[in-house]
Structure formats: C-alpha cells, structure tokens
Image (spheres, grey):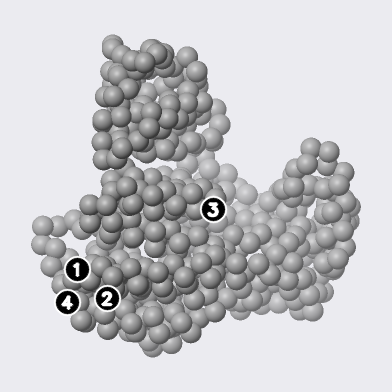
C-alpha cells in the first residue's frame, strides 16, 4: 500500500518514506512499520495497546515502552497530529491520507523514466564538455591538491589510509608527471585553517572545496573515499575543478594499487603518460554513471542504481563491472531471472586478461544467487547448477592464483554440501577456505567459514561445538573491529538460540547486532538486523 500525507509519500510495502521535492528517503524500522500499517488499515477505530503488542511483538514479552517508542517514531516522521492517543486504551490513526492508485504509480514511473532520460542526456553533454575541456586543459596544466583519503573500510586495519594515502598520491603524481602538486603539509594546514574559521563547527570538507582552491591557489582538488573489503577494494574519487565535479571509481585488490591507478587516471587525463591500469573506467559518461550507481547501491537505493548502471552500459555495453553491479541491484529487488541472465551474458563477452576477474566474479555470483535465492521446486537441481558455476569460478581463481576468490569458492562449495547434508565434504571445503583466509592481512574473512562450520555442528546437534566456532569467529571479528562480521556472527548465534526455543536470549544477541549496525551507520547492516527481528527473509548482495 502507498499513500501521500502532506509532502511525504509512504510505501508500506517497502517500508520507506520519501519527502517530495527533495531526495530525502527514510527507512522505517521493522516493528514501527508493523505498528503504522495496523493503524493506517484501521482508521475507523481505536486499536488497543494489547492488540498492537499481540500483533507486532507476538513472539516476545516486552514492556509498553517499545510501543510508545514506535508511536513516537511515526509522529516524528509523519507529524504529531497523525495519531491520537486514548490514555490507557490505545491509539487511532486520524490523519487524512491520499492513496496512490495504479494510474498514479504509472504516472510516477513515466516521470522517473523521463528524469532518467534527462539525466542520460545531461551526462552525455557533460561528457562531451569534459572531453573538450580536457583537451584545453592539456595546454595549461592545473595545480593539484589531494585531500586526506576518507576511510570507509569496516575494520581498524586501514586507519593509516587517510594521511598516508594522501601523501602517497601527492608524491607519486609529482614523481611520475610534470603536474604541479601541493605538498601534504600545506594542504593539511589549509584544511585546519579553514576549519578554525568555520564558526558553525562543520567538519566536512565538501563545502570548503572552493575556499581551499583559493587558499592553496590550486585548480584541481582530488577527493577520495576507500571502501570495500581487504583484497577487494573500491576507491571512489571526485575531481573538483572550475568545470564542476567529475566522479569515478577504481576497483583493486590493494590500497597501493588503487592509489597508483588514480595517479594513472590523472596522468592520462592531462596527457602525461599512457594509461596502463586495467581496473578503472575512463569514459566521461560511463565513468560518472558507474560511480554514482555504486554510491546508490551502497546506500540501498537500488532503483536509482539500476537506472545509473543501465545508463553507464549505453556507452560501454561490455563494461563488466557495471553489468555485475546491475545484476546485484536486480537481485536485491527480487528480479532474479534478469540478474542471472545478465551475468550469463557477461560470460559470453571476450575473455582476456582484463575480463578474467569479472568472469570469475560472474560465475561466483550466479552460483551464490542459486544457493541463497531458492526459486524452483527442484532444490537439488538448483544446488547442482550452483555447484557447476562455483566450480568454474574456482578454476579461474586457481589459474590466476587469486587466493581471495579461491577462498570464496571453497566457502560456497562448503555451503552447497552443507545444504545437501554432506557434512564431511562440506567441512573439508570450509577448512581449506580458512587456510587461505588466515594468510591474508585482513583475517576477519575467516568468520564466514567459521559460521558455516557452526551451522554444520548445529545440524548434527553438536551445540557445544557450534558455540566453539561462534566464539572463534567473534574473536577474529573483534580483533579487527570489523562491524559487518561481528553482526553476521551475532545473527547466526541468534538463529541458533531461536531454533533452540531460547527466544529471550536470541533477541538479546540480535539487539547487540542492531546496536553495532547503528554505530556503523550502515543502511545495509541495519536493514539486515531489522529483517531478523521481523522474521522475514532478506536477500541482499553487499
């Protein structure tokens, strides 16, 4: 059900509130969504507190305060006058709403489509402008300043990245090109000076780019953000010049390689040398759309991501990374057949040294989808097909000696064998995956294999053995302060206790996971934990 109230549009199916006239989106907490739905569907009567508690918190004993909190959240989001309180009795929805019918939805769809086409046209114009202006830029080289690298890695292993990464970029660009570059100390002093002048106490650098350009007398400010996981990184960059911001994203296995690829991008942009890196994309249109799409994907705005990735593929239809992210976005919106078909199409494209890694990923992702998104009635057939794709991924990983993806392939094979009840073989695959993960600098990748080993123990009713694996997995996650991995371990433990009938203990553990998700301020992690409380399956590719 979808409806409008004042300047907001509420989607009860997706659990989202959109503010019209802006791009603001607010995800509704799972329990609060259930309370809101029950009230909106019964506007002609008072819904008692007990009825709300019985329907929303039917599986756990709670205090009335949890209901009060949900009512407060609804009023904060939609207005204080939307719900009337009947003391000691309950609540009634009193605000007028405007249901959105199918014709309105179609109109909205057409509006979105027109906006997407307008965006596509704008990006093409911007791309052409960048091409023309880049040629002009080559005649007069800009002075460059790198900002500290924003570190969004989910661990403490990369705490060195902001300043050392910034210094690496500064030194490498100065050494490899004739571009004038502001040194690290001057940039840091300028940033500190501007922040001291800011009486509002705003620490973000985004609003200070122009002042920073003036202070340092530079024409190009490079802003970067590192995200992803060890051995599988993304370096997002924005080039701020007088022609406006230009965005891009680089995929790499190491921080140093990603930084060097960015230096190559800048060198190529100003015709300082030939580009040699194979992991980045430089089409003005496709690069911008791909980078924006990845950002939307990370914020769980999958519909926007789908439009952006499709736009990127207009210029570069063989852009395998964009095809992979588009497939992930389609899967996250339950368009599984389209996702798998797209990935299968990627496997038909030329298999050269630049695409082998993406072919590996495509095989692995198809297998992953077949394992975790069961669709057909013949589950055994699905798992057999998944095993075929995972085996192909394993072969590609082994031929290129890609240890991370060898480990990933072993983990998925272990899952398949666990689901088939072949516990001994599953254990062998998972222990082999652990050996690879233990050789990495970021060792918290071990947690996935340890959780799977715990699930095997649970299936064999060896609860103490399962607890041992969970404890080991949490120890590994805690050592690196890796919040996603901590959450996966806690939710797996919560699943075990819920299956054992210890609901109170299960909810307590899941609450710990929710606290960590909120501390990490990750929409994906918060949604995952809330789905556990709502007892609804959530299929998400991170």
Does 282 sit left or right of 459 as displayed? right
In the rendered structure, are the residues bearing label 3 and label 1 in contact, judged by CB atoms less than 8 Å apart? no
Per the image, label 3 sits on a secondary structure element best described as: helix
User: Where the N terminus falls, by quadrant?
Assistant: top left
Please state the horizontal and vertical placement of residue 319, each as a whole percent of the image. Answer: 46, 65
Q: Name the residue under label 2.
A: 414
Q: Position of residue 12 (x, y in %)?
A: 34, 31
In contact (CB < 8 Å): disc 4 and disc 3: no
Relative image position of residue 159 (x, y in whole percent): 65, 67
- First in sequence: mark 2 vs mark 4: 2
* Residue at the spot 39% in from the left edge and 53% down from the top edge: 509
> Foreground mark, 2 or 1?
1
Residue designated by label 1: 461
**How far apart are the two marked residues, 2 and 1, measured between alpha carbons?**
18 Å
Q: In this view, does 52 lie above or below 409?
A: above
Q: Is mark 1 on a helix, strand or loop?
A: loop
From the image, tell me which residue sits under label 3: 520
Q: Determine which quarter of the picture holds residue 423.
A: bottom left
Q: Which mark sits nearer the N-terminus, 4 or 1?
A: 4
Task: Give the CA distance from mark 2 to mark 3.
Answer: 30 Å
Q: Which mark is residue 422?
A: 4
Q: Where is residue 395 in the image (x, y as percent from the top left)?
A: 32, 84
Could you tell which of marks 2 and 3 lies nearer the N-terminus? 2
As drawn, 80 above or below 511: above
Alpha carbon of mark 2 to alpha carbon of mark 4: how far?
9 Å
Query: Is residue 534 among the parts visible in the rendering?
Result: yes
- 531, 257: nearer the viewer: 531
Category of crowding for the residue at label 2, using alpha-carbon neighbours closer than 10 angstroms: few (below 14), some (14–19), many (at least 20): many
SS for callout 2: helix
Q: How far apart are marks 4 and 3 (CA)?
A: 37 Å
């Amino acid at each position: 059900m979808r409806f409008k109230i004042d300047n907001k549009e509420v989607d009860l199916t997706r659990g989202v509130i959109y503010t019209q006239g802006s791009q603001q989106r607010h995800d509704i907490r799972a329990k609060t969504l259930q309370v809101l739905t029950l009230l909106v569907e019964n506007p002609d009567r008072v819904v008692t507190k007990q009825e709300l508690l019985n329907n929303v918190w039917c599986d756990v004993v709670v205090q009335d305060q949890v209901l009060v909190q949900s009512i407060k959240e609804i009023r904060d989001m939609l207005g204080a006058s939307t719900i009337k309180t009947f003391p000691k009795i309950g609540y009634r929805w009193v605000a007028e709403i405007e249901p959105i019918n199918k014709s309105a939805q179609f109109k909205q769809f057409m509006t979105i489509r027109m906006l997407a086409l307008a965006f596509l046209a704008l990006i093409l114009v911007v791309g052409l402008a960048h091409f023309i202006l880049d040629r002009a830029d080559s005649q007069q080289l800009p002075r460059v300043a790198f900002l500290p690298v924003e570190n969004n890695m989910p661990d403490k292993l990369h705490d060195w990245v902001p300043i050392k990464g910034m210094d690496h970029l500064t030194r490498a660009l100065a050494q490899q090109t004739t571009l004038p570059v502001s040194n690290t100390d001057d940039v840091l002093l300028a940033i500190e000076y501007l922040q001291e002048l800011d009486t509002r106490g705003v620490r973000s650098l985004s609003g200070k780019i122009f002042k920073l350009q003036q202070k340092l007398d530079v024409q190009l400010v490079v802003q970067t953000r590192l995200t992803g996981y060890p051995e599988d990184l993304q370096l997002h960059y924005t080039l701020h010049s007088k022609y406006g911001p230009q965005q891009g994203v680089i995929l790499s296995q190491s921080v140093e390689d990603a930084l060097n690829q960015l230096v190559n991008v800048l060198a190529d942009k100003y015709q300082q040398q030939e580009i040699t890196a194979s992991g980045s994309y430089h089409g003005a249109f496709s690069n911008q759309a791909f980078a924006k799409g990845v950002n939307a994907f990370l914020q769980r705005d999958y519909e926007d991501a789908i439009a952006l990735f499709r736009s990127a593929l207009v210029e570069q239809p063989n852009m395998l990374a964009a095809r992979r992210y588009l497939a992930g976005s389609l899967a996250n919106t339950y368009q599984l057949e389209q996702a798998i078909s797209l990935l299968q199409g990627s496997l038909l494209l030329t298999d050269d040294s630049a695409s082998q890694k993406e072919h590996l990923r495509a095989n692995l992702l198809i297998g992953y989808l077949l394992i975790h998104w069961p669709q057909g009635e013949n589950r055994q057939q699905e798992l057999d097909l998944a095993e075929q794709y995972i085996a192909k991924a394993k072969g590609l990983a082994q031929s290129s000696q890609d240890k991370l993806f060898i480990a990933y392939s072993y983990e998925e094979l272990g899952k398949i064998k666990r689901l088939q009840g072949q516990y001994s073989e599953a254990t062998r695959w998972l222990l082999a995956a652990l050996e690879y993960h233990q050789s990495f600098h970021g060792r918290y990748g071990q947690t996935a294999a340890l959780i799977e080993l715990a699930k095997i123990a649970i299936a064999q009713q060896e609860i103490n053995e399962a607890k041992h694996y969970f404890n080991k997995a949490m120890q590994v996650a805690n050592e690196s302060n890796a919040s996603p991995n901590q959450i996966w371990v806690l939710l797996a433990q919560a699943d075990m206790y819920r299956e054992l009938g210890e609901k109170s203990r299960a909810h307590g553990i899941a609450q710990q996971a929710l606290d960590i998700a909120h501390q990490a301020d990750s929409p994906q992690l918060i949604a995952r934990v809330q789905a556990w409380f709502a007892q609804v399956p959530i299929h998400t590719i991170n």
